[in-house]
Image (spheres, rainbow, N blue to C red):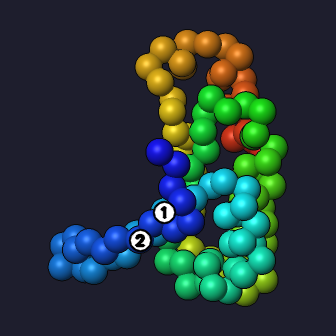
Amino acid sequence: MPTRKIARDAFNFLGIEFTRMDFGGQLQYREEYLKNPTKYISGTDLLFYVIDAQDYDRYVETIDYLDQILLFLKENQEYPPLCILFHKFDPGLTKEKVINQRILTIKHALI
């Protein structure tokens, strides 16, 4: 089931308290986050950005969204470490040349 709005939870790791925030990726939520980036994005200490490896039709959309997030962070002189992850990269998918080419294309767009 897709995340609705933002799912938050806290956990302790090696004596350090962390808060994990999972942002729902549906368009209505993304628009809200970008309308109020100070509320949702400011103060980010570490950013994991997850891309659905099998949703090729939305690669451009996801890169544009990430660009908007990074632009806000840059304008506010916030530079959290960024980890980009490909989700739903099922076993056997790496053998498909078309998939690999699409992943390389998106990788080059991010560099």
Where residue 100 sits, quadrant-wise, is top right
How far apart, in angstroms, are the residues tagged by discs 2 and 1? 6 Å
Q: Is residue 53 above or below residue 67?
A: above
* Identity of the residue drawn at 45% across and 66% down: 7
* Identity of the residue drawn at 34% across and 71% down: 9
Q: Earlier in the sequence, mark 2 or mark 1?
A: 2
**Which residue type does callout 1 highlight?**
Asp
Q: Is residue 38 above or below residue 101?
A: below
In the foreground, 88 or 30: 30
Residue 111 shows up from this direction: no
Q: Under tag 2, what secondary structure?
A: strand
* Identity of the residue drawn at 48% across and 63% down: 22
Q: Position of residue 111 (x, y in %)?
A: 73, 50
Q: Kindly identify which residue carries mark 2.
A: 8
* Identity of the residue drawn at 52% across and 68% down: 6
Q: Position of residue 61 (x, y in %)?
A: 79, 48
Q: Image check: 90 left or right of 28?
A: left
Q: Image check: 63 left or right of 94?
A: right
Q: Is residue 27 above or below residue 47?
A: above
Q: Image check: 42 left or right of 69?
A: left
Q: Position of residue 65 (x, y in %)?
A: 76, 58
Residues packed near mark 1 inside 10 Å, few (<14), some (14 to 19) or many (20 plus): some
Q: Is residue 79 above or below residue 57?
A: below
Label total for image: 2
**Which residue type does callout 2 highlight?**
Arg
Query: Which mark, by number, is residue 65?
Result: none
Q: Kindly identify which residue carries mark 1.
A: 22
Q: Position of residue 59 (x, y in %)?
A: 75, 40
